[in-house]
Image (tube, rainbow, N blue to C red):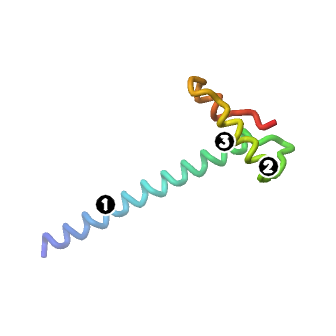
Amino acid sequence: MKYSIFTVSITISLHLIMISFIVTYVFLVSGGFSIIDSLLQKEGAKPMSFSIIRKRWNQYLAVRRNDPIIRVLFVSSD
């Protein structure tokens, strides 16, 4: 009986710790993405259309392999 109570309490506490890590991680990631989105969004941003997506994809493909990763991530959209 003593071991079963200990086992149940350990199981519950480990699950609570695991859930708290997951909630914290999801909150940090989603909050970080929303902050990055608000920082990078232009004031007069146009809605995305298929032609804009296709144009950006072609710009990404045009970046050379030896270019820095920042250039790949922040290819200008105009």
> SS for tag 2?
helix
| Amino acid type for the residue under numbered disc 3 | Ile
Q: Position of residue 9 (x, y in %)?
A: 25, 67
State how far apart marks 2 and 3 are (Cα): 24 Å
**Of the residues tagged 2 and 3, which is closer to the observer?**
2
- Quadrant location, the C terminus: top right
User: Could you tell whether 26 is left or right of 62 in the image?
Assistant: left
Q: Nearer the viewer, residue 62 or 52?
A: 62
State how far apart marks 3 and 1 are (Cα): 33 Å
Q: Earlier in the sequence, mark 2 or mark 3?
A: 3
> Would you name the residue on which mark 2 appears?
51
Q: Earlier in the sequence, mark 1 or mark 2?
A: 1
**Of the residues tagged 3 and 1, which is closer to the observer?**
3
**Of the residues tagged 1 and 2, which is closer to the observer?**
2
Within 10 Å of disc 2 (Cα), the crowding (few <14, some 14-19, many 20+) is few
| Amino acid type for the residue under numbered disc 2 | Ser
> Would you name the residue on which mark 1 appears?
14
Q: Is residue 47 above or below residue 15?
A: above
State how far apart marks 1 and 2 are (Cα): 49 Å
Indicate which disc residue 36 carries. 3
> SS for tag 3?
helix
Q: Earlier in the sequence, mark 3 or mark 1?
A: 1
Indicate which disc residue 75 carries. none
> SS for tag 1?
helix
Q: Position of residue 16 (x, y in %)?
A: 37, 62
